[in-house]
């Protein structure tokens, strides 16, 4: 395993981390949690010492599974994370609500401390500021008590906004979505964090499944390697000097092995060197929907991620008919629904990729 130093700390973390939101669904449903816990145990055996978990993942069982594994290993051999935001506190900004949430995570993880506790899912600066004004002080208090070791945040903000948060110097590290789809507009954020001495952990390195689903469009990532497209996409992320850990969601031991292989003999490069290496290769990917589904709550009931996923097919194949093929063939959605959009802008304000959703729906509606 290839290890990197986490920001300006002395912690050495594996270049690939275990994303614990993909424990086997059937096993989770059937309550076979011990069986699911074999995955983090196997990951550690293979050198993966960074385990990222959170409430709500896997029907709210991920922390419990991860705790089962954590209780079977030397605690200091693993860096474990969890997360909290106003949503998980049910918008209750009191100290009690925060402590209840933190204590629940500690109990589920069967541990006295969490290595990295995230202020979770900051969609924009407003939401970040709300969290700073209300619960940040509780993070600091818990840190002083040794219940959490490092205060970090997770975000879907764009480069410039991330830079503003980084500038505050309030966080040891951050977790952001970064991949071969969106790297061009996320690079300034990871560079700013790295320069500030922060650790940078990356979620969603496969672009919400889009990269493995379109292997031809992304085959350029595998050039000169014996890796599969998903492995090459993981390596792409991990190879950035500015990035400390690339998370890989693993359901099976094979997934763990695949992730480990992806970073064998890793060579680190700066974000500029990576950009130069891939300049002009592949299609223009910044405009793709990642399927994150943050654009919820359309007043007209339009299933936006399905429409935007179908629009992706057009961007990836260059065929306009691919949109309608995907809508009807894959999603069983009527394209006429797109014309129902009243342009309220709610979805665009939530969109983590900042896509022109209204314009695209208009285009689909008139096809
Ligand atoms: S802009 Fe259109 S698609 Fe977006 S939330 Fe409003 S009505 Fe729905
Ligand atoms: S349209 Fe935007 S918010 Fe909605 S799923 Fe796609 S990327 Fe996510």
Image (cartoon, grey):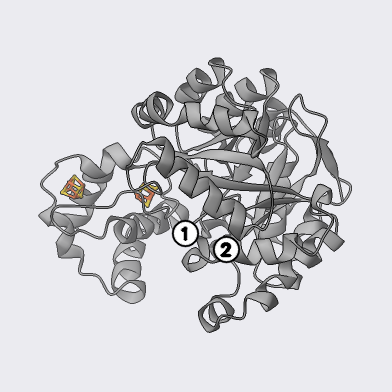
Q: Which residue is mark 1?
A: 56
Residue 254 image point, x, y percent: 75, 71
| Whether residue 145 can be seen here | yes
Question: In this rendering, is residue 150 above or below 214?
Answer: above
Residue lying at 47% horizontally and 68% vertically, measured from the top left: 59
Residue 272 image point, x, y percent: 68, 26
Q: Quadrant of the C terminus?
A: bottom left
Residue at the bottom extreme, as displayed: 30
Query: Callout 1 environment at 10 Å: few (<14), some (14 to 19), or many (20+)?
Result: few
Determine the image quadrant of residue 287.
Answer: top left
In the displayed structure, does residue 251 sit left or right of residue 349? right
| Whether residue 282 can be seen here | no
Q: Is mark 1 within 8 Å of ligand 2?
A: no
Cβ atoms at labels 1 and 2 below 8 Å apart: yes
Q: Secondary structure at mark 1?
A: loop
Residue 346 image point, x, y percent: 21, 42
Choose the circle earlier in sequence order: 1 or 2: 1
Residue lying at 68% horizontally and 43% vertically, measured from the top left: 237
Query: Callout 2 environment at 10 Å: few (<14), some (14 to 19), or many (20+)?
Result: many
Which residue occupies the foreground of this view, 143 or 327? 143
Residue lying at 49% horizontally and 31% vertically, measured from the top left: 138
Residue lying at 64% horizontally and 57% vertically, measured from the top left: 109
In the displayed structure, does residue 298 sit left or right of residue 136? left
Question: In whole angstroms, how far apart are the C-alphas of marks 1 and 2?
Answer: 7 Å
Residue 282 image point, x, y percent: 58, 46
Q: Which residue is mark 2?
A: 62
Q: Secondary structure at mark 2?
A: helix
């Amino acid at each position: 395993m290839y290890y990197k130093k986490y920001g300006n700390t002395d912690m050495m973390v594996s270049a690939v981390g275990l994303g614990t939101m993909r424990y086997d669904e059937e096993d989770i449903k059937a309550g076979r949690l011990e069986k699911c816990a074999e995955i983090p145990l196997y990951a550690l055996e293979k050198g993966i010492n960074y385990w990222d978990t959170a409430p709500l993942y896997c029907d709210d069982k991920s922390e419990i599974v991860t705790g089962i594994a954590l209780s079977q290993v030397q605690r200091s051999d693993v860096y474990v994370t969890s997360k909290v935001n106003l949503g998980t506190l049910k918008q209750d900004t009191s100290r009690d609500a925060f402590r209840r949430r933190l204590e629940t995570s500690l109990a589920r993880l069967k541990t006295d401390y969490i290595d990295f506790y995230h202020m979770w899912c900051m969609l924009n600066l407003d939401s970040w500021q709300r969290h700073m004004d209300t619960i940040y002080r509780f993070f600091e208090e818990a840190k002083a008590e040794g219940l959490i070791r490092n205060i970090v945040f997770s975000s879907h903000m764009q480069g410039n906004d991330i830079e503003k948060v980084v500038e505050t110097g309030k966080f040891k590290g951050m977790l952001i979505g970064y991949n071969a789809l969106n790297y061009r507009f996320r690079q300034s954020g990871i560079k700013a964090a790295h320069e500030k001495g922060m650790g940078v952990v990356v979620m969603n390195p496969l672009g919400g499944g889009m990269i493995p689903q379109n292997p031809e469009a992304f085959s350029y990532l595998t050039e000169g390697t014996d890796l599969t497209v998903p492995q090459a996409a993981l390596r792409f992320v991990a190879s950035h000097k500015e990035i400390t850990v690339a998370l890989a969601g693993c359901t099976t031991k094979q997934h763990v092995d695949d992730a480990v292989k992806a970073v064998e003999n890793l060579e680190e490069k700066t974000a500029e060197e990576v950009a130069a290496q891939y300049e002009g290769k592949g299609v223009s990917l910044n405009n793709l929907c990642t399927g994150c589904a943050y654009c919820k709550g359309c007043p007209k009931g339009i299933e936006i991620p399905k429409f935007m996923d179908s629009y992706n097919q057009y961007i990836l194949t260059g065929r306009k008919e691919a949109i309608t093929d995907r809508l009807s063939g894959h999603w069983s959605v009527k394209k006429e629904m797109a014309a129902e959009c009243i342009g309220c802008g709610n979805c665009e304000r939530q969109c983590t990729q900042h896509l022109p959703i209204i314009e695209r729906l208009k285009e689909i509606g008139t096809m």
